[in-house]
C-alpha cells in the first residue's frame, strides 16, 4: 500500500512562500498519532527536493530505522544510513512495495505523480487552522481531477483536522 501523509494550511499550502514549514511550529506538542503511523510503515520514498530540505534542517535524520528511497537521477552524497537512490519508475516502486506499506513523504509533486498514475492508495491530510495566503501548493495546478472517498475524520487540539481518504477505485480496506 502506498500512502500520502502530510500537513497543509486551510488554504491549501504545504510550505510558505520561501518553502519553509515553520508555520507548523505552532502545533508542536499536539499528538497527531505520528508514532503509530510511522510504526506501520515499512519504507519511505521522497523526491530529491524533499530529501534536500530535510537534510537542511540541521537535525538528525528523522526517518531512522526504515529504508528510505530518494527518487532522483543524481547521486546522493553521504546519505544517512538506510537511504538510497531510486532510479526506477513509479510503477516499479509500487511493484517493489507490494505487500508492504510505503509512505510517499512530503513533496506535493511526487504525491501528485503517484496519484495521477493510479498508484497511491490512501491520502491523509492534516489541515492546520491558518491561512498562509501564498506558498507551495498542496498539489500542483493542472493535474487531472481525481476522486477521493472520505474514510475517516478526526479533530485535534488547536483546531487541527485530519482527513483520511482512499482514492476512488481502491479497496475500502486499504
Image (cartoon, helix red, strand yellow):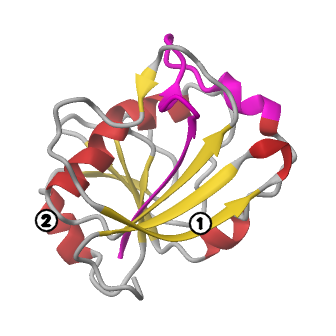
Which residues, given as a range, are shown in magenta? 1-26
- Of residue 126 and residue 89, the one placed in the foreground of this image is 126
Residue 50, percent from left and from top: 43, 35
Q: Is residue 96 left or right of residue 164?
A: left
Dot 2 crowding, Cα within 10 Å, few <14, some 14–19, many 20+:
few
Q: Which mark is residue 6?
A: none
Viewer-closest of 107 and 135: 135
Query: Dividing the picture into quarters, in which one does residue 1 lie?
Result: bottom left
* Figure label count: 2
Image location (x, y in percent) of residue 29: 87, 46
- Please state the horizontal and vertical placement of residue 91, each as a whole percent of the image: 13, 65
- Residue 65, labelled with which disc? 1
Q: Which residue is mark 2?
A: 91
Give whichever of 144, 1 is nearer the camera.
144
Q: In what quadrant of the picture does the C terminus appear?
A: bottom left
User: Where, by quadrant of the figure, is residue 108 drawn?
Assistant: top left
Q: Secondary structure at mark 1?
A: loop
In this view, 16 is above or below 31? above
Is disc 2 placed on a helix, strand or loop? helix
- Depth check, mark 1 against mark 2: the one in front is 2
Q: Is residue 133 above or below residue 79?
A: above
Percent x, y of residue 83: 43, 53
Do the residues under discs 1 and 2 have CB atoms within 8 angstroms? Answer: no
Amino acid at each position: 500500500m502506498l500512502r500520502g501523509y502530510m500537513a497543509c494550511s486551510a488554504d491549501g499550502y504545504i510550505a510558505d512562500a520561501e518553502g519553509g514549514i515553520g508555520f507548523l511550529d505552532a502545533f508542536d506538542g499536539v499528538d497527531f498519532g505520528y508514532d503509530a503511523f510511522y510504526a506501520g510503515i515499512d519504507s519511505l520514498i521522497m523526491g530529491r527536493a524533499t530529501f534536500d530540505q530535510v537534510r537542511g534542517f540541521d537535525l538528525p535524520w528523522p526517518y531512522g530505522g526504515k529504508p528510505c528511497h530518494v527518487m532522483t537521477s543524481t547521486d546522493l552524497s553521504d546519505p544517512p544510513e538506510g537511504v538510497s537512490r531510486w532510479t526506477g519508475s513509479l510503477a516499479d516502486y509500487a511493484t517493489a512495495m507490494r505487500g508492504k506499506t510505503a509512505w510517499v513523504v512530503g513533496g506535493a509533486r511526487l504525491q501528485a505523480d503517484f496519484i495521477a498514475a493510479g498508484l497511491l492508495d490512501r491520502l491523509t491530510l492534516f489541515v492546520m487552522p491558518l491561512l498562509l495566503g501564498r506558498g507551495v501548493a498542496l498539489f500542483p495546478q493542472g493535474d487531472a481531477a481525481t476522486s477521493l472517498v472520505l474514510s475517516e475524520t478526526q479533530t485535534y487540539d488547536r483546531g487541527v483536522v485530519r482527513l483520511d481518504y482512499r482514492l476512488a477505485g481502491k479497496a475500502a480496506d486499504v
